[in-house]
Image (cartoon, rainbow, N blue to C red):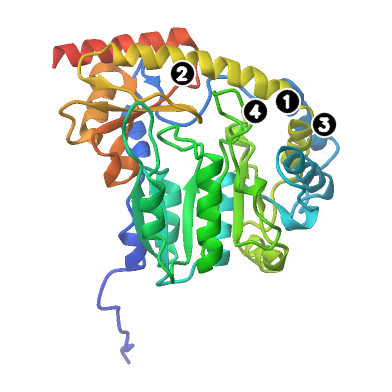
Amino acid sequence: MPLNISFPASAPAARPVVQQLIASRIREVANAGLGLEGVLPFWFGEPDEETPSFIRDAAKQALDAGDTFYTHNFGIAPLREAIAAYVSRLHRPVSVNRVAVTSSGVSALMLLSQVIISPGDRVVAVTPLWPNLQEIPKILGADVVTVPLRFGETWELDVQQLLDALTPGTKAVLLNSPNNPTGWVITRAQQEIILAHCRRHGIWILSDDVYERLVYEGEDCAPSFLDLAEPDDLLVSANSFSKSWLMTGWRLGWVVAPEAVMADLGKLIEYNTSCAPGFVQRAGIVAVERGDEVIRHTIARYRAARDFLHERLNSLPGVTAPRSKGAMYLFFRVDGAQDTLALCKRLVTEARLGLAPGSAFGPEGEGYVRWCFASSVARLEEGASRLEAFLRKG
């Protein structure tokens, strides 16, 4: 007797909201450069220096001691305590009960978004903005409204424009300062205004603080909402070990959140990654407790790199590069560039130069290109020479 088998009417497909996500155009450019010889890669936000040996040694020792088992969802107690002490030293006192360790900074952003954002929520993002952070709310079904930074000698925020967008009923505002890709740094006065407005209207602030130590105007830490907020304010902060301690590949981050949401955050950590690897967390402890010299070295190196590249790019035909106040990028305009994805693919294949297209950071980024300057001046000069030759060739 023949079997009565029915087949689906259509092919398997992801959820429509996932299909509509914009794939990373930074990765698209990088993929175009894979296998090509001699490419200078400045596309990712990554230093050209490896993680310091004392941090690597801590992980090796933990592995040799057999630290290969599950840990607490929130992270091992010594690391949480070290992070709480570190955050309290930089900002206002933060209880260890408000700190959770995550498997990377981007995981921290996803987890915090899952805690506060529901399908249909209205979310406001200050752009241009790292594509991962822009797309996370869309994955969760939120409606994302953007407020663009203003291009000039430096990138700047029109606070009133942001306040006008933060209407009653808005669920959250996404702020990344120091900003990837522009190097914009929010001021303390701006934070006070935004925090007061969000308190008045019950709007969450999701603050991406990954670059907070990479500032170049005299301070050792960028202004943070953690300096101002009360423990029960609608504020969540995401951070990472990647940038401050040269640990991009370790995939280790943390969050600071109101204690009232921590139990629910713990559920989400369990259902996402369960926990960060124990031996990686051991490396995190020594980074936080002994890594100040690493940060000082990095800031001095990046400041020199920024100053060199800023001057060099502005000497090129058709290039206007605002000065970066923080992070590790210059986000510069190229005259006549209407499709920066195509431009950056040409730069890879024709000039062996890897840069990130501005369109990767939202529609407001089109016409601009991002250059990560976390590199030696010699490599930056070689890259700038390749860009100059490309532009002059036309």
Q: Where's residue 221, x and y in %?
A: 63, 33
The mark nearer the N terminus, 2 or 1, is 1
The mark nearer the N terminus, 3 or 4, is 3
Image mark for residue 239: none
**Mark 2 touching mark 4, by CB under 8 A?**
no
Q: Where's residue 321, x and y in %?
A: 33, 23
Q: Of tags 3 and 1, which is closer to the observer?
A: 1
Q: Which residue is mark 3?
A: 61
Q: Where's residue 26, x and y in %?
A: 36, 37
Q: Residue at x 56, y 63 (%)?
A: 199
Image mark for residue 306: 2
**Disc 3: CA contacts within 10 A as few (<14), some (14-19) or many (>=20):** some
Q: Of tags 1 and 4, which is closer to the observer?
A: 4
Alpha-carbon span between mark 2 and mark 1: 21 Å
Locate residue 83 relative to residue 239 in the image: left or right. Answer: right
**Mark 2 touching mark 1, by CB under 8 A?**
no
Locate residue 196 relative to residue 296 in the image: left or right. Answer: left
